[in-house]
Image: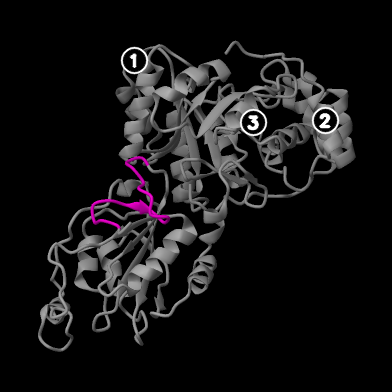
């Protein structure tokens, strides 16, 4: 999913309709899972090394002959907390090479559209970056040919490229447009020209106009109720409410996903064990073909199961990717603890490095399991998904997870199979719902969100799917939150 948050519908239902909705929910399906930069390395904007698995999806790339472009690139990387990469030529340019209109090296290269000066080193893990800011000086009205070398060295399909140039007087002109053919399937934004005296504030204003600042300023794990997203420790944004698909199959599954996407839902949760990844992939691809969404707008979670799947994790992970058939997977979880869980997690880490999975996490892990597991892996989980609802609140587990910079997601948010009617009819929840003119389900989902828990209620009913997105036009008071908190029975509704 893009770092811009998904946009949800915010229509309010009348209370009388919501009350009727509560009764009909009893048959609904609910999810059960529910220093100087070197050419060979990328670095953080604060000059700290990223390492092989640095989780950031914005990269600032620059070529600088005199230092002007380097300064602008440094500002941008610092503002965005982005990784930064300097294009360093194998054969460095000398002052004589850069003596314009002398027939020197730079002149000859710019006169030859086929010139491709060699680059020393390469970008590590280019697959992890969604957005690339590309900076260069203007040479004879165009980008230096070494920029062409860079663009032809990687696959930029689906990525956003933001060009910027530095010059004393020339604008960016046709220099950026002439680069487009070298990355035809990238999303090119309008470029910007900066001078040597450009301030950091001016760069920040430009980035703000592009909509990149809000993501850089986001705090990991803190819910943004304006964009309905949360920034994960992997550097990606995830919607904070979505659709669970446990027990949805065939046309019912395809239709439910379609209705969800049409209603503004951008988070879809599935698992290998659900047996519906193919239908979900079909529904997503059809929605993309129909112009309802773009792939980058959707956040898809799937899981691999204990036993044979974790015993041969590489095969199992690839099978999930193949069944979904949507390119990459936004997040993959281990469905339960298992004797091979560390082995399986390390396999997922490798798929992250290859750009096939963007974020990874765990499902049904609690304090004891996490304490033992976390020291054994390299990439921290971005998410832990557990059963959470007013009758089983995990008030000791949630803070433990969140304090580690890991987002919590709740399955069975409405109580789960056989328990939904009782929970929706709870007198405390019903009274609060009546006070706000919303449904009991909306109150429960909003309670989760205000506790910092992402919700993935399952449903095959289009009205309920739509209603479950309408959680942002009201807010529970502290007293109402406390009243629901007091309903905790430590009553788990499934075995795991």
Of residues 225 and 68, the one drawn nearer to the viewer in this rendering: 68
Q: Secondary structure at mark 2?
A: helix
Q: Earlier in the sequence, mark 2 or mark 3?
A: 3
* Residue located 38% across and 66% down the image: 73
Q: Is residue 192 visible?
A: yes
The image shows residue 311 at horizontal and vertical percentages of 34, 15
| Above or below, comparing residue 465 to residue 425 in the picture | below
Q: What is the tally of numbered marks visible in this picture? A: 3
Q: Quadrant of residue 358?
A: top left
The image shows residue 174 at horizontal and vertical percentages of 32, 79
Q: Quadrant of residue 393?
A: top right
Residue for badge 3 = 457
Of residues 447 and 25, the one drawn nearer to the viewer in this rendering: 447
* Residue located 56% across and 57% down the image: 214
Residue for badge 2 = 482
* Residue located 58% across and 28% down the image: 401
Q: Is residue 217 left or right of residue 178?
A: right
Is-magenta flag for residue 51? yes
Residue for badge 1 = 311
Q: Is residue 429 visible?
A: no
| Above or below, comparing residue 450 to residue 148 in the picture | above
Q: Earlier in the sequence, mark 1 or mark 3?
A: 1
What are the residue bounds of the magenta stretch? 37-53
Q: Secondary structure at mark 1?
A: helix
The image shows residue 247 at horizontal and vertical percentages of 56, 22
**Of the residues tagged 1 and 3, which is closer to the observer?**
1
Q: CA distance from mark 1 to mark 3?
A: 30 Å
Q: Secondary structure at mark 3?
A: loop
Is-magenta flag for residue 474? no
């Amino acid at each position: 999913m893009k770092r811009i948050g998904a946009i949800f519908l915010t229509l309010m239902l009348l209370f009388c309709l919501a009350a009727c909705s509560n009764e009909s929910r009893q048959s609904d399906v609910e999810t059960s899972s529910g220093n100087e930069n070197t050419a060979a390395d990328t670095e953080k904007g604060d000059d700290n090394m990223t390492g092989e698995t640095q989780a950031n999806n914005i990269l600032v790339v620059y070529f600088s002959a005199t230092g002007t472009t380097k300064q602008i690139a440094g500002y941008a990387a610092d503002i965005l907390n982005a990784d930064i990469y300097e294009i360093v030529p194998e054969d460095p340019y000398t002052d004589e090479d850069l003596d314009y209109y002398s027939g020197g090296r730079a002149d000859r290269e710019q006169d030859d559209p086929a010139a491709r000066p060699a680059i020393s080193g390469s970008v590590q893990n280019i697959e992890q970056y969604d957005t690339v800011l590309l900076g260069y000086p203007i040479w004879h009205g165009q980008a230096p040919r070494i920029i062409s070398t860079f663009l032809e060295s990687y696959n930029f399909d689906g990525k956003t490229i933001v060009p910027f140039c530095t010059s004393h007087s020339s604008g960016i002109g046709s220099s950026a447009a002439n680069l487009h053919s070298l990355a035809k399937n990238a999303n090119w934004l309008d470029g910007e020209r900066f001078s040597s005296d450009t301030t950091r504030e001016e760069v920040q204003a430009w980035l703000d106009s592009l909509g990149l600042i809000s993501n850089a300023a986001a705090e990991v794990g803190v819910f943004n109720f304006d964009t309905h997203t949360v920034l994960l420790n992997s550097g990606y944004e995830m919607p904070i409410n979505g659709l669970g698909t446990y027990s949805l199959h065939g046309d019912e599954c395809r239709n439910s996903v379609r209705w969800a996407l049409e209603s503004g839902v951008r988070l879809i949760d599935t698992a290998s064990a659900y047996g519906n990844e193919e239908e979900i992939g079909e529904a997503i691809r059809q929605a993309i073909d129909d112009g309802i969404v773009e792939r980058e707008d959707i956040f898809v979670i799937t899981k691999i199961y204990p036993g044979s799947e974790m015993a041969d994790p590489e095969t199992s992970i690839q099978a999930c990717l193949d069944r979904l058939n949507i390119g990459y997977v936004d997040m993959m979880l281990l469905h339960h603890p298992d004797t091979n869980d560390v082995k399986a997690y390390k396999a997922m880490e490798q798929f992250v490095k290859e750009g096939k999975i963007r974020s990874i996490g765990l499902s049904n892990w609690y304090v004891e399991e996490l304490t033992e597991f976390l020291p054994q892996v390299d990439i921290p989980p971005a998410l832990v998904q557990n059963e959470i609802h007013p009758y089983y609140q995990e008030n000791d587990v949630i803070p433990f997870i969140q304090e580690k910079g890991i987002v919590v997601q709740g399955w069975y948010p409405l109580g789960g199979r056989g328990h939904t009617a009782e929970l929706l009819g709870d007198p405390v929840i019903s009274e609060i719902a009546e006070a706000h003119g919303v449904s009991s389900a909306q109150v429960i989902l909003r309670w989760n969100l205000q506790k910092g828990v992402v919700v993935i209620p399952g449903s095959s009913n289009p009205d309920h799917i739509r209603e479950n997105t309408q959680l942002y036009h009201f807010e529970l008071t502290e007293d109402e939150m406390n009243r629901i908190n007091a309903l905790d029975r430590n009553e788990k509704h499934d075995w795991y």
